[in-house]
Image (cartoon, rainbow, N blue to C red):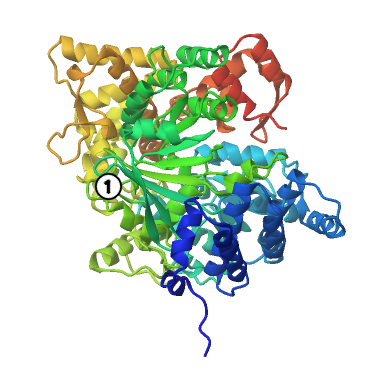
Amino acid sequence: MKRDLTLARIRNTDFPILYKKFILDCEITKLELKKILTIATIFLNSTNQNIQNLGYRIILIFCNRTKDYRPLYEVAMNLGYIPVARSIDLLHTEESFFHVFNSAFIENFHKGQVYMSEQQYELDNFFTSKNFETVSVIAPTSYGKTELILSLLKKNIGKKICIVTPTKSLLAQTKIRIINSKIDWIKKVVIQPEMYNGTEENLVAVLTQERLLRLLKMQPELYFDFIVIDEAHGLLNDDTRSRLLAEVILILEKRNPEVALKFLTPFLGDSDNLRIKFMDINISEYKVSEYIKTERFYIYDERETKKLKFYDQFLDDFYDLGYQQDNTYEFIKKTSGENNIIYLNKPKDIENFSNKFIKFMPSFFNKKIEKICDNLKEFIHPQYQLLDCIKSGFIYHHGSVPDSVRIYIEHAFSVCSEIKYVVTSSTLLEGVNLPADKLYILDNRKGLGYLSPSNFKNLIGRVCRFSEIFKEEPKLKKLEPEIYLVISEFFRNRAQVEKYLQKTMKVDKTVSDELENILLRNTEMNQKQTEELNKEKEFIENYEEGTLVEFDGRKTQTMIGKACFANNITELDIFKSEHVMQKKINYLKGNEIIIRTTENLFQVLYQVFFKYIEDNDKNQNLRRFQYQETRNFYNMFLNWRIRGASYSEMIASFMGHWDNLIKNHGDTLVYVDRWGDQTRGGIRELWTDIRKKSHKEKINLAIVRIKEEQDFLDNTVIKYIEVLNDLHLLDEVLYLKIKYGTDDKLKVLLVKNGLSLGLANLVADQYSRYLKINYANNTVKYKDEIIEKMQENDENEVLIYEMQYFIEK
C-alpha cells in the first residue's frame, strides 16, 4: 500500500541536505537547483497541506531571489492566491492569451479596494450565508475581518448589533471605520453606555465587555440581535476580563435566545472550545488554511554562545549561521529593515531597552523630527524620554503611554522614514496595526506566562500585513517576513528558546487550545476551580436573575449588595460585607448626606468599601486606601482632573509631592506598581525609593504614573463611585466632573463620543462652530474645516492628529 508523503518521511531522506543549501542561499549547482524545483512541483501536487506549503515556500523564495516570477504566478493561480498573482501582473505585464485570460479571471476576486484570495472569497460567502447563525471565523491578521463586520452591518438594516473589542483603544478606531463606510441606516455608533437613550429602534454599539455590562445594567430590557466578539481567543484565558466576557454573553443569550454570535479570531484550534457553560449553542466554523506568507526564523544568542541560527519550521531543524560579535542593539541595527517592531513583555523593560538603544543610534536633526519633538515637549514635558528616542529614529509604545500621544507617534512611525523602529509590548496583539517588515522578539513572555502558540502566531502576523505587501507597487519579498528571537538580558534565564520555537512553530505539530476559563464547557476543573465557578454563578444570578436554569446559590439581601453586583464589584466578598456596608449607607441616607467634595468622597469610599477589600496580591492598589496619605493623594489627583490640569501641571505636582517627601525626611518609598524595584512587606516589587531617582527619571516616572492612575480611577475606583451614584448619594455635578472631567454639557458630549478631555476642552472652547451637535441623540459630527482652522491657529499637532481620527472621510 502506497504511503502518503509527510514531513516526517521527508526528514529521513537526503532532501534536507539539498534543502539546507537552497534555504540558506549557499552555492548551488544548476542541477541541484533543477532538482529542488522539480521536488517543489511534486510537493505542490501533494494532498498533504504541509507538503504543499513547503512546495510553495521553495517556489516563492526562488522567485524572490531571481526576480523571475513566472513560476510563482502559475502556483498562485492554481492555489487561489489571487493577491499574489495580481501583484505579479502589476510587476510584469505580458500579453499572451493565457495571461489575459487569467487577468480577467482575477477580476472576479476584486472587491472594493482589494483583491481577495480564494479562501477570503469563500469566507465572505460563508459569513453572509450564515447571517443568522452563530459562527467562528479563524483567519490570520490581514484577512479582512473588519470587512466582515461591515458586511454584517450593511445586510442587517435596523437590527441591534454590538461589536465587543478587547481594549478601549480600539473603540474609536472601530467606530470611525463604521462611520466612514457610509452605511445609510447607521446614524450613531455607541461607544459609551450613556450615549444610548433607550428610545432608538436600532442600535450599533462598539464596547468593551465592561462597558457592555454597564449598558445592560442601565437598560434592563435591552437585547441584541447580533454580537461580534473580536479577538475571541481571549475568551480562553483565566482572568477576570475573560470570565466577564463569558458572563456577558450568557446574559445576552438569556435576553435573546436567538442572538447570533460572531466569534472572530486569528488563531484557534477548535471552535468547540468557545462554547460556554449553561448555554447550548452550535458554532459553524470557517478556518483559513491558506499559506501566503512564509516566515524566516532566526535565533541570536547574544547572552551566551554569540551564535546566529536559522530555524526551518518545515524540516524542524536549526542551521548555524556563524558567530556574531554584535551586542543586541548593534545586531538589531545591522539586520533591520525599513520598519521594524521590537517586542518586549514589560513596560519597564521597554523603557530600559530604549535608554540603551539610544546610545547605538545616530541622531536626526531635520525639520520633520524637530516638529514632532516640539509638539511632544509642549504637550507632555521637555524631558520626556520619548523625545530622545524619536531623535534616534525610534518610538516606544506601551499601555502607560498617554492615548493622545500614542495616536500621534503611531502616525509618525507610519509616515516618517527616519523613524524605523517601534519598541512595544502585548498591546500589539490587541489590534494595533503598524507597518513593519521585521520583528525582533526580546522576550517570549506575555504577562507572567509565555506567549502561547496562538499569541505568538498572532504577534508575527502583525509583520508584513497584506495591505503593506499588495500595494500598487507590490513588495513580494515581504511574503518572507523575518522574525528574530534575540536572547539577551530580557529573556528569562534557561528560557530554552529552541524548544519554545519548535513547540510553537513546527508546522506538523498539533497545537491544542489552552483552556483556562472556568466558564467554558471544555475546561477541565479541579476542586478550587469548582469553588470559583460557584462564585461566578452567584455573580451571574445576582446580576441577571433567571440566566441560569438551575441555581441554588446565595442571593444578595441588601440594596448595596445588588448595586455591587450590578457594577461588577469583585474585589470584596459582597455576601460577607453587605450588611455592614448597608448600615453605613443607611446612616448616610438617614442623615440626608450627599457627597459634594472629592475629599468626602474618598472618606466614604474607604469607610463603606475599601475597609473590606480582600487581602491578596491583586488588590494591593485598593488596600492602600487604608492610609490617609493615599486618600489625600487621590483627592488631589481627582481634583487635577476636574480642573483640567495639563500634563505639565500634573508632572510638576508629582515632582513637588516627591520633593517634599525628601525635604521633610518623610517616607520616600512610594508606590509605583509595575515600575517598582523594591518590595514592602509583600513579594512583588511595587515600590521605589524616590530619593535614588535622578530629576529626569522622576519626570518620566511621573508621566507613566499619571496615565496609570487615570486608568486606575477609570477602570477600578469608578465602579465604587457608580454604586454610590446608583444609591443617590453623589451630587450630580461632582459625578459628572469625576466621570467626564467636566459638567459642561458640550464637553461631556464630546468626551462621550471618544475625545480626550484635553481635546474636548479645546474644541468646545474655541471650535464649537465647526460642530454638528445633536444632544437628543448624544451625537456630534465634525466639519472638515476644523482641522484646517486648528492648523492655522498653530494648535499642538498631538491634538490635531487626535481630532483627525474623528473626521469622517
Q: Position of residue 157 (x, y in %)?
A: 74, 53
In the depicted structure, whether residue 534 falls above or below residue 402: below
Q: Position of residue 366 (x, y in %)?
A: 54, 12
Q: Position of residue 771 (x, y in %)?
A: 69, 23
Judge by depth and name the residue closer to the eye, 467 or 6: 6
Dot 1, how many residues are within 10 Å of its Cα: few (below 14), some (14-19), or many (20+)?
some
Q: Quadrant of the C terminus?
A: top right
Residue drawn 49% across the image and 44% down it: 211
Residue drawn 57% across the image and 65% down it: 35
Residue 156 in which image quadrant: bottom right
In the depicted structure, whether residue 728 falls above or below residue 260: above
Give left or right: position of 416 versus 546: right
Judge by depth and name the residue closer to the eye, 23 or 628: 23
Residue drawn 64% across the image and 26% down it: 804
Judge by depth and name the residue closer to the eye, 109 or 486: 486
The residue labelled by disc 1 is 572
Tell me the element at label 1: loop
Number of residue marks: 1
Q: Identify the residue at the far bottom of this view.
A: 1
Q: Position of residue 808 (x, y in %)?
A: 71, 32
Three-letter code, disc 1: Leu
In the depicted structure, whether residue 277 falls above or below residue 334: below
Does residue 578 show up? yes
In the depicted structure, whether residue 768 falls above or below residue 720: above
Does residue 190 show up? no
Residue drawn 40% across the image and 70% down it: 522
